[in-house]
Image (cartoon, helix red, strand yellow):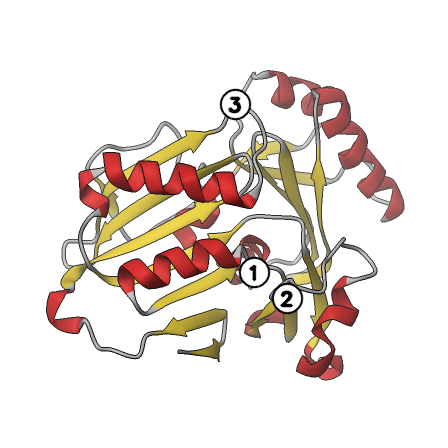
Amino acid sequence: MRLKPTETGQKLMAKTNNSSNKLPHLDLSIQLGLSGLSFCILNTASKTIVSLNEFHFEKQLNPLKVLDELKTIFTNEALLNNDFSNVTIIHDNELSTLVPKSLFNKNHLADYLKFNAKILKSDFIAYDVIAENNSVNVYVPYININNFIYDKFGTFTFKHVTSVLIESILKMEVDSVSTKVYVNVSFDHFEILVLEKNKLLLSNNFTYNSKEDFIYYLLFTAEQLNLDPETLNLILIGAIHEHDELYNIIYKYIRNVSLGTIKYDFEYVDKPKANYSNFTLLKSF
């Protein structure tokens, strides 16, 4: 078994080749964190999402309990009990930091993380190279989840949610000539990216327990970057809908608010309520 870095993630390679059992036209992507997980299955031949499911835990769990939940879902969801052509795991946590590629040294991974995340000596630390802005995202994956997926499928790719987010949005905004703020909303946390003329100014994440927490962190970020709430261009993606309590309080303080208009190269068997939800999961393919 070996770890092989890729341009936007790392691939866990099996010793044996299971390709004879793989379904040649189905890809699986799973995104998981301590408060929930989601999975998506793409038929690459027909370019169709054949399954898209979300599971939210009643409270935040530890990684061991998340693995128990994942095992239960694999037991109950028949579609997951196939071999897939490609499997991707997206680790969704706050244990990450961006490093300019020119300053990156893989022998100092723990040093990059220890100033803004609580890590243990036993933690396995990984990194994703983000070509779009010549940076490296250093992070702690849920290694028990990786081991389970490795035992089940063999070869698979894993990434951090921030890596997928930055890579995807920078590709979308490659021709942008203005300043934009993207917020990727989850049920108890959010990631925020600030772009100026398609250049990444800031990437951060916050945990929130109320809509007041949410707007405080959002306005605090704007203040630190001298962005005027009356004029900044805010784009919302993820678990948010027009006129829900988060949207309402955001619109109270920020006027130029929109829900993301996202284009994908596939169709759906069952179309989701909004095409901006599950952004990072769908963009991982």
Horizontal placement of 278 versus 167: left or right?
left
The residue at which mark 2 appears reads as: 137
Percent across and percent down for residue 151 are: 32, 62
- The image quarter containing residue 106 is bottom right
What is the quadrant of the N terminus in the image? bottom left
Percent across and percent down for residue 28 are: 29, 53
Q: Amino acid at mark 3?
A: Glu
Residue sitting nearer the eye, 71 or 113: 71
Structural distance between the alpha carbons of marks 3 and 2: 30 Å
| Residue 285 in sight in this render | no
Structural distance between the alpha carbons of marks 3 and 1: 27 Å
- CB contact under 8 Å: marks 1 and 2: yes
Q: Which mark is residue 58?
A: 3
Query: Dot 3, how many residues are within 10 Å of its Cα: few (below 14), some (14-19), or many (20+)?
Result: few
User: What's the residue at 87%, 41% (across, down)?
Assistant: 223
Q: Amino acid at mark 1?
A: Ser
Percent across and percent down for residue 90 are: 47, 54
Task: Mark 3 or mark 2: name the one nearer the start of the chain.
Answer: 3
